[in-house]
Image (tube, rainbow, N blue to C red):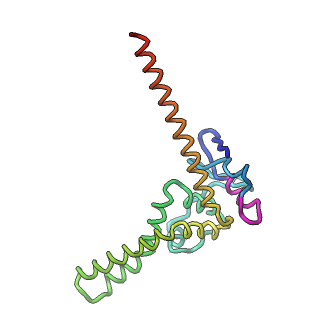
């Protein structure tokens, strides 16, 4: 698989195109990793669609499990495939737990120590459950945004491949610099 960066900015357009191209959702092998998004805008295969971040009220709805309008479609893909997708998932889970937490703190007729213990236990168990189903939950969000099943996983895998290649190139360059310094030092003796 090949990856290609354009002007230092890459996108998930090939992964999106691949996920829409086959009826089963499986991408064509040659087009799976053409671009992987790192910074900048996501270019949709059907046109240049800028990534539009939802306003706060829509993000809260999205965090609680609701869908977003079509104009936020590429942002949903970015949200579930960026390098911080796990942290974003935990933030959404904490938002989901905020309402029950507030209700327990406000309505349970007990001392503050017991209320805080109940909330702590609930948040702990909620996070365990949320982390156990993290991949499935984010994939469902991508499907709800209109992408084919498996798109988020393929985009994260493609991004991982690009990061590994960039890291390998960086390490090779550093090794060449060390070798040049070594040769320069040993050649002077």
Q: Is residue 187 left or right of residue 120?
A: right
Q: Residue at x 53, y 38 (%)?
A: 168
Verify whether residue 42 appears in magenta.
no
Query: What predominant SS class does the magenta segment belong to?
Result: helix
Residue nearest the observer in this picture, 20 or 181:
181
* Residue 177 x, y percent position in the rendering: 47, 25
Q: Which residues are magenta?
A: 13-26
Q: Quadrant of the C terminus?
A: top left
Residue 3 x/y as whole percent: 65, 44
Q: Position of residue 13 (x, y in %)?
A: 68, 52
Q: Is residue 160 above or below residue 100?
A: above
Q: Is residue 97 left or right of residue 5?
A: left
List the single residue furthest toward the top: 189
The answer to which quarter of the image holds residue 82 is bottom right
Please give the name of the residue rendered at 59% of the width and 62% of the height, measured from the top-left corner.
76
Question: Whole-percent x and y of residue 91?
Answer: 44, 65
Q: Residue at x 60, y 72 (%)?
A: 67
Q: Residue at x 62, y 49 (%)?
A: 36
């Amino acid at each position: 698989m090949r990856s290609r960066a354009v002007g230092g900015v890459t996108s998930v357009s090939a992964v999106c195109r691949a996920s829409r191209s086959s009826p089963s959702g499986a991408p064509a092998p040659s087009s799976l990793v053409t671009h992987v998004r790192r910074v900048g805008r996501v270019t949709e295969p059907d046109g240049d669609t800028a990534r539009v971040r939802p306003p706060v009220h829509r993000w809260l709805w999205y965090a609680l499990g609701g869908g977003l309008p079509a104009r936020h479609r590429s942002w949903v893909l970015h949200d579930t495939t960026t390098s911080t997708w796990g942290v974003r998932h935990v933030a959404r889970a904490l938002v989901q737990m905020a309402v029950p937490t507030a209700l327990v703190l406000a309505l349970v007729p007990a001392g503050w120590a017991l209320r805080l213990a109940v909330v702590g236990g609930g948040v702990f168990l909620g996070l365990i459950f949320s982390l156990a189903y993290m991949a499935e939950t984010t994939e469902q969000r991508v499907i709800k945004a209109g992408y084919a099943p498996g798109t988020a996983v393929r985009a994260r895998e493609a991004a991982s491949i690009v990061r590994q290649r960039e890291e390998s190139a960086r390490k090779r360059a550093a090794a060449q610099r060390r070798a040049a310094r070594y040769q320069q030092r040993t050649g002077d003796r």
